[in-house]
Amino acid sequence: MKNMRGRILRKLKFISTPTRKPVVGGSLSFQTNTTSNLVKQTVPTLIIENFTMSEIPSHVKEETFLSSPNGDSQAEKLESKSEENGAIISVPEFEEDRCPPGGRDGLVLYTTSLRGIRKTFEDCNTIRFLLESFRVVYSERDVSMHLEYREELWGVLGGRVVPPRLFVRGRCIGGADEVVGLHEKGMLKNLLQGIPLVSPCNNPCRGCAGIRFLMCCTCNGSRKVTNEEGNEGVVIKCPDCNENGLIKCSVCS
């Protein structure tokens, strides 16, 4: 075993160190250490200035040439330039049959207060938070509180659409992804120009505390009343409330 090791060491002494031609901007060499029998590799260091465009990998081009000395990318420059020149916002054309009732000159937001699907509930809160941050007046229509709102939304968009959905001056902008995307590009503020602002001293409704619905006073939320006309003692459906035993607040609706 010792003789074999000795022969290997003697052979390593006569092996020349393999080298390659230097690469532009760096070197690639292999050095043999006869003492520890370890091979050390020197990784080449690239200098981009000495390369032509065809020799640079695509990912290096994106990281190096798209960045300016100040650290600003071309994409950011183009985006800032479009903001300075005034970005063109593409919104659907107004259609009378696709406009929610009473939403021609304002904002209508269809939401749901049910938390069964977490993402849907959080999306509704996201759009509501954005509108409140701009302090604009909007009409919120909770499809889980009133079945007519759901049928209204489905009829306007022509299908079983899931809230949230935001309408600006009768035009459907979209859901949370579309609204947040417009806000991140600075375009949502332009869309909301001309919408009335909330009064600084605006307080929650005294009638419903901002819930927009009240319990039916006729049936006390049971949705059943006694028929006073005709047969006595016959229970019928309450004609004043909706499927949840609620009525719209007469103060804020």
Image: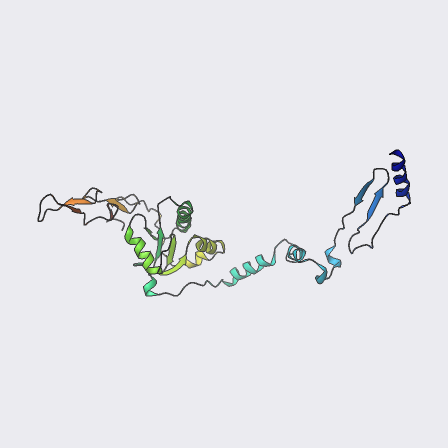
Q: Report whether 67 appears left or right of 7.
A: left
Residue 82 coordinates in the image, percent (x, y): 53, 61
Could one spot residue 103 in this view of the protein? no
Q: Residue at x 61, y 56 (%)?
A: 73
Q: Residue at x 28, y 53 (%)?
A: 148
Q: Is residue 89 above or below residue 184?
A: below
Q: Which image quadrant is residue 62 in?
A: bottom right
Q: Residue at x 82, y 47 (%)?
A: 30
Q: Which image quadrant is residue 77 in?
A: bottom right
Residue 211 coordinates in the image, percent (x, y): 30, 45
Frontmost residue, 204 versus 113: 113
Frontmost residue, 105 versus 94: 94
Frontmost residue, 126 versus 72: 126
Residue 197 coordinates in the image, percent (x, y): 36, 53
Frontmost residue, 29 versus 175: 29
Q: Is residue 57 above or below residue 208?
A: below
Q: Residue at x 42, y 59 (%)?
A: 191
